[in-house]
Image (tube, helix red, strand yellow):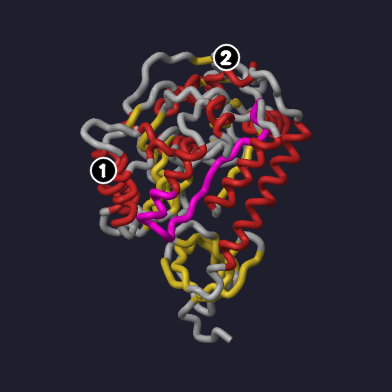
Amino acid sequence: MSIQTFGCRVNQYESEMMRDLLSSTYTIADESPDVVVLNACTVTALAERKARQAARRLRRENPASRIVLIGCLADAVEQGTTQFTDADLLVGNRWKSRIHEVVECAMSDLCGVMSVSSLDELNNERTQGPSHRIRAFLKIQDGCSRACTYCRTTQVRGEPRSKSIQAAVAEATDLVASGFPEIVLTGIDLAQYSPEGGHLDDAVRAIASLDGLQRLRIASINPSGITDKLIDVCASIEAVCPHFHIPLQSGDSEILKAMKRGYNAPMYVDTIERIRSRIPHATFGTDIIVGFPGEVKKAFARTLDMLDIVGYSNLHAFRYSPRKGTASALFPHQVLPEIKRQRSETLVAHWLGGLGRTLDNRIGSTQHVLVEEQQDAVWRGYTHDYLYVKFSSDRQIPIGSLLPVHITRRTGSTLEGVDDHRIDTS
């Protein structure tokens, strides 16, 4: 039995959940699996292509394996917005909590699409966390009602749903007890997290206050979710990491209007400024789409200007790809692929220049790093505000340790340093 994951942090969480559900009955291994579960995304053409390539490779290397396509991509196939010919069985997101039934059907040689109408309670979704990692994802929200003109998420994930704060705290408590020093709260649209009797700031406060939890991160969150109460909680609790991944998508207000993002460029900047007024040392990440229909040179230039205004420490750049079934696929003034490529390269180069200046300002400082991996005498991990660091030490440091590192230089997008407690720092 093998599980392969393509897509967002929510997919990663759900793959861990399925692995936990199956591990008591099946051996989870990639070598000669009887059944391969592909948990795949449909948001971009690239995500779909990776899943198709994986399925074809499996057909060549393990022709006897039964291939199950599960998740957003399978839902899109059932809805007729895309095709996937290299799977034996296709099942949508609603089957993930019932993965045992899916595997049994696959092993019984059932083929085609399995349809299901009911949704399981989000409170019933739990994971024990990924093995051999120090960071665990905790999914507290699913679905989206924004209907951005480029996105299939509403079609395949359905309406917003929220895990109760009590269920989220219980799951987080178990993750901390299992040895995870860092938890990342995630969802399809955390800005729409609205459990009965509470809000996102209440969940963050409750989870961040757990004994033994060293770090709590908030995954990608749209600007509307950045309330003053949430900012206050993040500013007042040390365990909450001062890093905010807030999707921008475009720095041009007209493009944002065409995308139906629900905010314009000045509103986005105001969100950044509200955070910085309370948390001056905060860092920011974002998602940007280049080549959206109608994106002229001036519109793209405004996106580059936004990089300078915010100074992102983390960037996910995407080239717009028309998705069948979305409104923007029918928009006029589609941008040529070569222009998308050029703008993507320009965007990343511009961002890296700003990132270099941000990182250079950390040289000579001491940063607290949560150690995630080690090779020879070099350890790697992230700072509290999500900057990547590798450092040397002449002592053995357990994975999961939080320790001060003296930053000595920058190589590309990585900070380098030495263990502040080294015996010999010459």
Q: Does the magenta segment cover residue 286?
A: yes
Element marked by disc 1:
helix
Q: Where is residue 175 in the image (x, y as percent from the top left)?
A: 34, 49
> Mark 2: which amino acid?
Gly
Residue sitting at x 50%, y 85%: 423
Q: Give the range drawn in magenta.
A: 273-293
Nearer to us of marks 2 and 1 is 1
Residue sitting at x 42%, y 40%: 186
N-term-proximal mark, 2 vs 1: 2
Q: Does the magenta segment cover residue 1?
A: no
Distance, label 2 to label 1, CA atoms, is 43 Å
Residue 202 image label: 1
Using a 10 Å C-alpha cutoff, classify the residue at mark 1 as few (fewer than 14 neighbours), some (14 to 19) or many (20 or more).
Answer: some
Q: Is residue 293 left or right of residue 220?
A: right
Residue sitting at x 55%, y 64%: 389
Residue 148 image label: none
The residue that mark 2 highlights is: 112
Along the viewing direction, whichever of 300 and 85 lies nearer the viewer: 300
Query: Does residue 16 show up?
Result: no
Along the viewing direction, whichever of 293 and 101 lies nearer the viewer: 293
Q: Where is residue 319 in the image (x, y as percent from the top left)?
A: 67, 35
> Mark 1: which amino acid?
Asp
Q: Is residue 141 left or right of residue 260?
A: left
**93 relative to 175, above or below:** above
Q: In which quarter of the image is the N terminus?
A: top right
